[in-house]
Image (spheres, rainbow, N blue to C red):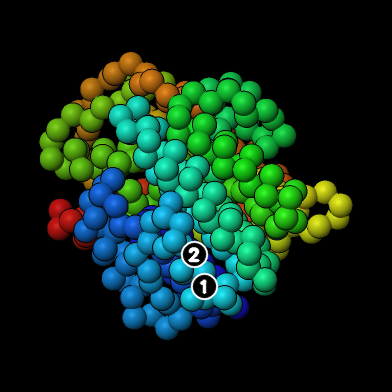
Amino acid sequence: MTVLVTGTAGFIGYFTTLALLDAGRRVIGIDNLNDYYDVSLKQARLDNLLGRNGFTFSQTDIAEREAVDAVFRENPDITEIIHLAAQPGVRYSLINPYAYTRSNIEGHLVLLEAARRLSGLKHFVYASSSSVYGDSSDVPFSTDKRTDTPVSLYAATKKSMEMMSHAYSHLYRMPLTGLRFFTVYGPWGRPDMAYYIFTKKILAGEPIPVFNNGEMRRDFTYIDDIVSGVVSCLGTPPADLGLPPYRLYNIGNNKTESLMDFISQIERALGKKAEIDFQPMQAGDVKETFADIDTMVEDFGFSPSTGIDVGIPRFVEWYKEFHGA
């Protein structure tokens, strides 16, 4: 029984792979190690995985059909898939939109096609995003609510992944679960995320860009809580009871935090005040996110336990050590 993890050198993929290996699972990790952000960070994560018992890595682009098919042919014992590889970032989708359709839509389709031919597939779990809720003011966001008004191409591609997955579950009775992640942060995080940028600039004595004049709120979710939810979900595939064996869940902290409070936590952890450059709302951004996680709690006992007062100091400690700050 083998788990395929895509995006294994990415932030969430790295920690998910670690958790599976720690539990004694065999993991095949694939990642194309692209240069959307500093490849050395991805390589550093990967270096911590290479050599671990049960781990195999393939540098593979999920949108390349022949390469992906080769991984599946060479590993017919794959029983579970955690698909985390994606082109992330709302703002970058305004600059390079084709990267999003290639990775998030074409890449997802390639994996669905390969997975449906597996004889022993038990569960296919994939990452969606809170961005699918658009600029809704009806909080907390529930998976029962409509999500057909995306405000960014990134969100539109994630919504497309959800619809494609439902179709494959219906057509081929594939057990598929989509997880809508809410603003994941923590050590080894992505350098394009606000908390990473803020930390870097504050330490350098540079002003930090704060959009919508700071009037924004997010459901910040610590990486350990995210991984706990992903792994719990993996072990409980949806049953085929006449309807497609398909589910959608929110994974968040179930608490919406002020962006300015979040910045205050970074300042406190650094022992240094930020110089703030207030800016208007950016295109494609949303004012607030807030996850309704009731179904995750009911079905998996999901219980996020890490507040920003704990998570941010852990990130800052890692940042200083990793970057020698």
Q: How many marks?
A: 2
Do the residues under discs 2 and 1 have CB atoms within 8 angstroms? yes
- Image side of residue 32 versus residue 228, left or right: left
Instruction: State the residue in front, 284 or 240.
Output: 240
Q: In the rendered image, which residue does mark 2 sit on?
A: 69
Q: Position of residue 149 (x, y in %)?
A: 58, 23
Identify which residue is drawn at 30% across, 41% down.
192
User: Hey, which residue is sitting farthest right in the picture?
Assistant: 242
Residue 232 at x, y = what percent?
A: 63, 62
Mark seen at residue 73: 1
- Of helix, strand and loop, which one carries label 2? helix
Q: Residue furthest front?
A: 66
Q: Residues within 10 Å of mark 2 (few under 14, many from 20)?
A: some
The amino acid at mark 2 is: Asp
Cα distance, mark 2 to mark 1? 6 Å
- Residue 56 vs residue 246: left or right? left
Q: Is residue 117 above or below residue 130?
A: below
Q: Position of residue 158 (x, y in %)?
A: 53, 39
Residue 19 showing in the rendered view = no
When the figure is inspected, residue 278 is found, relative to residue 37, above or below; the finding is: above
Q: Amino acid at mark 1?
A: Arg
